[in-house]
Image (cartoon, coloured by chain):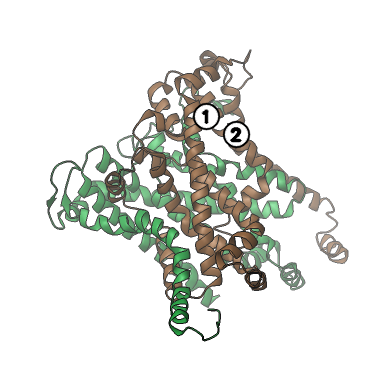
Chain colours: A green, B brown
Amino acid sequence: MPATAKPKNAPLKEWLRRASKLSPYLWILPALTVYGIFKLYPLVSGLQMSLLRWDGIEEPRYIGLRNFQRILSDEMTATVLMNNVHYAVGTVVGKIVLSLFLAILLHQALRGRTFYRTSLFMPVVMSFVVVGVLWSWLFNPQFGLINSLLRGLGLDFLVQDWLGDAAVALNSLILVDIWKWYGFHMVIFLAGLQSIPDELYEAARIDGASVWQQFLHVTLPMLHPVMIVNVTISVMGAFNVFDIPFIMTAGGPANATNVMALHIYIRGFKFYRFGFSAALSYVLLVIVTLVAAIQLKLMTSGDNTD
Amino acid sequence: MSAAQFSRQAAKRQGVYWRPLLVKVFNHSILILFTVIIVYPVLWMILASFKTPGELISNIWGLPASPAYQNYADAWEKARLGRALLNSGIVSIGAVLLVVCLSSIAGYAFAKFSFRFSTVILLVFVFTMQAPVPIIPFYVLFVRLKLTDSYLGLILAIASGTIPLSIFIFQAFFRSIPNELREAAKIDGCSEFSAFLRVVMPISGPAVATVSILTFVGAWNEYFMPLLLIRSDELRPLTLTIQVFFLQFGRAEWNVIFATLSIASIPMIVIYVLLQRWFIRGLTSGSIKG
C-alpha cells in the first residue's frame, strides 16, 4: 500500500513509510476517541464504583462485594428480573408471530403493498414519549378508547383498569411495545421473504407439498437468518426496556411493571445509591450477555441438524 | 405460478375457482385490520388535539363540534414547545453532523486500508455496541467533564451510541466503490484524504442518507439521555418537555397534551411519509444487509 518512491533520501523514505503505516489510525482516531471515552470507559470505570458505598456527594467508602451480595439476597431483584423475562417472552412472541404472519400476507397481496408497509412501519419514527403518553390515555379506564371500544362491542367482561391493575399492567405495556414495533419486524421479514427464490416453492409444489408444508419446509428454514436478527433485536429491547414503563406506570402498581433498567435508574437517581446502582448495571450487563449468547447458540446450533 | 399449475390445483380442489379471490379478500382484510390498529390511534390523537376537555369525555369517537385551536396556543405557551423544538433540532442536527463526519472517515479506513488491529477494533465494536451502558459511571463522567446540561454533552452521549453501526454502514458502502477511482484521484495529485473528500464522498449520498436518517430519528426521539443529563428548563428537548408537561398538567388538561403530542410527531410523520423508502431503508439498515 505505501507508495514506492525513488531511493534518494533513505531516512526520509523510512519516515514516510512509517507515517503512512500510522495514517490509518489517524483516520479512525476521532471516532474511536468519542466511542472510547463515552461508551467503553464507563463500561470499565463503573466496576470500581460498584464496590463503593456512595451517594454521589459524600466521600465514597470501599465495601468490597457487599453491593453484589445485597443484590443477590434482595427479593426485589427477583421480582424485577421476572418482570423482564415476562416482558421478553410477551414482546418477542407477540412481535415475531404477528409480524411474520403479516409479512407473509403482504408478500402475496401485491396491490397496496407500499401503502401497507408505510402505514405499519410508521410508529417506528414516533418517540416512545409520544407513544407512551398517548397510550396511557387510550388505556384510561373510564374515557379511554380501549374500554369504550370493548363496551361498544359488548365485550364488557374484557373491560379493565389496564395500567392500574397489578395483574394486567405489565401485559398492557407489552401490547404497546408490540404496537410500536410489529411493522418494523414485518419489513425485515418481508425482505427475507423476497430473497427466497420462487423455484424452491415450485419444486415443493411439484413434490405435492401443501401450503402449510411449504411454509414449514421452505419458508421457515429460508427465513432463519432474518429470524435470528428479529429475535435478537426484540430480546435485547426487552431486557433494556426503560421508556415505556418509566413514562406509563413508573414501575407501578406495586412494582408490577418495574424492570431492571428502571430499577437501576430509581436506585441511582431517586435514592442516590450510586454504588448499588452501578453494581446492578453489571448484573444486567451479565444477564443481557448471557441471554444473547444462549439465544444465538440455540438458534445457530439448529443449522447443523436441519 | 404457471397457468397449467394453477388449473391443476384448481381442478384438484374440484372446481373451487373462487378460492384465490377468497385468499385475496382474507389477506387484505387482515392487513387492513392491523393497519387500522396502527393508524387509527395516531389519527385519533390529532382529532383529540382539537377537542375541548368536555368533548374528550362525552364525545370519545366523534369529530370535535368546532376545532379548539386554543389547545395549540396553550401547548405552545405553557409547554414552551418553540424552545423545545429548537433544542431538539440543534441536538439532532449536531448529532448527525458529528456521526456522519467521524464514522465516514473511520469507515473509509476500515474499508480501504489494511492495518494491524483493524479486525480487533471491529470486534470490540460488535461486542460492545449492544451492551447497556452502566448509567452511574456514565453520568459521573459527564459531570466530571462538565458536559451535563449542555448541547455538546447531549450530542456526544447520543453520537457515541450510534457510531459503531454507522461505521459498519459506511464501511460496507465504501467497499463497493472501486479502488480505481481512488487511485485515479491520487495520480491526479490528490492526497489520500482529499481523494476521499472530493471524489469518494460526493458519490456516497446513499450511505450518508442512511446514517443521517438513523441518527436523526434516534436523536429526535431520544428520551433517556436528556432525562439523565439535562437539568435546566431552557435546554430540554421535545421528548423531555412533553414528559415534564405531562407530569405537571397532564391529568387535568389532556386536550392540551394531545396538541403537544401532535406538534411533536406530525412533522416527523410527514417527512417519513414523503421519504418513506429512504426512512425504511435507513431505519432497518442495521438489520438487513445491503
Residue underneath mark 2: B267
Labels 2, 1: front one: 2
**Chain ID of residue with mark 1:** B
Residue underneath mark 1: B261
Quote the CA–CA distance across marks 2 and 1: 11 Å
Query: How many residues crowd mark 1 within 10 Å: few (<14), some (14–19), many (20+)?
Result: many
Of the pair B207 and B198, the residue shown nearer to us:
B198
**Residue type, label 2:** Pro
Q: Is residue B46 left or right of residue A159?
A: right
| Residue at image coords 50%, 42% | B92
Asked if marks 2 and 1 fall on the same chain, the answer is yes
**Whole-percent x and y of residue A245?**
39, 39
Image height of A75 relative to B185, above or below: above
**Chain ID of residue with mark 2:** B
Of the pair B70 and A59, the residue shown nearer to us:
A59
Q: Quadrant of the C terminus of chain B?
A: bottom right
Residue B181 visible somewhere in the drawing:
yes
Residue A176 visible somewhere in the drawing:
no
Picture quadrant where residue A267 is located: top left
SS at mark 1 in the image: helix
**Residue type, label 1:** Leu
